[in-house]
Image: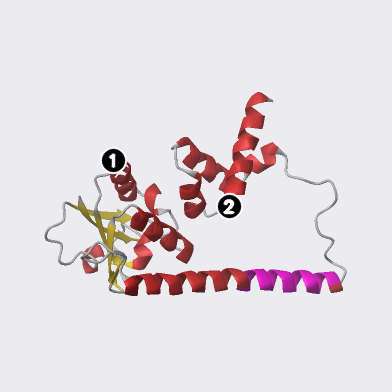
Amino acid sequence: MKVFYSRVSSNDGSQNPERQLQKLKGFDYVFTDYCSGSIPLFERPKGSQIKKMLNDVTLNHLEIHSIDRLGRTTLDVLGIWEDLTKRGISVVCRNPNIRNIDDNGRVDKFSELMMSILSTMSSFERNLIRERQMEGIKIRKEKGLYSGRRIGTTDTAQRLLEKERSKTILKYLDKQYSYDEISKIVPCSRTTITKVKKAQELMAIS
């Protein structure tokens, strides 16, 4: 199946998808989601149909107007791009003009470079955030305002499961998503997913 996917932020007329919907001959499906980009791709109404095609192994070509249609954050975009590439599904982005697989079925080198740059920028951004957090802690320590985590205080299973991220993880686990897929969508580490799953099991037997 050859699919063109677009997304606009609202359906109240303030945004018009026509700018994205150009040159659409030859597509089996043209999907448009009217929702916030903060919603993960596969949780959107039309995005969930793309996920079903992936599960049914019927999707072989996905085309988008711009790279940010795949997700709000760089991590979201990179995760989906990498996943589709591993599945051998052709992804074509019109703005910027990049594709994951060339006409010979090989990974497109230019696009690979572009995604590598995006990945480096994402890593730099995460490191910058960590540095700012550490600087903030250092300043608070110097002022005597930071004491760190109190000894003996850990999240109970119930508290962990009450967190929004934990609820999202459990939702994907219920849908039979793999740990790798969940870690890219949420995003979070596999260790976090394991903790949430164990907390759920603990609450079930308590």
Q: Main secondary structure of the magenta part?
A: helix
Dividing the picture into quadrants, the one containing residue 100 is bottom left
Residue at image x 32%, y 55%?
34
Residue 167 colored in magenta in the image? no
Task: Please state the horizontal and vertical placement of residue 60, each as a whole percent of the image.
Answer: 24, 52
Circle 2: is it few (<14), some (14-19), or many (20+) Cα within 10 Å?
few
Dividing the picture into quadrants, the one containing residue 134 is bottom right
Callout 1 amino acid: Asp
Q: Residue lying furthest left in this view?
A: 25
Residue 13 visible from this viewpoint: yes
What SS does tag 1 mark?
Answer: helix
Magenta-colored span: 128-141
In the picture, the disc for residue 56 is 1
Mark 2 vs 1: CB contact within 8 A: no
Q: Earlier in the sequence, mark 2 or mark 1?
A: 1
Circle 2 residue: 189
Front in this rendered view, residue 36 or 24: 24
What SS does tag 2 mark?
Answer: loop
Instruction: Specify the quadrant that holds the C terminus.
Output: top right
Residue at image x 27%, y 55%?
32
Callout 2 amino acid: Ser
Residue at image x 28%, y 40%?
56
Front in this rendered view, residue 97 or 111: 111
Front in this rendered view, residue 45 or 24: 24
Q: Is residue 51 above or below residue 123?
A: above
Instruction: Give the alpha-carbon distance from disc 2 to disc 1, as whole Å.
Output: 27 Å
Task: Please state the horizontal and vertical placement of residue 58, each as a whole percent of the image.
Answer: 24, 45
Q: Is residue 56 left or right of residue 169?
A: left
Residue 14 visible from this viewpoint: no
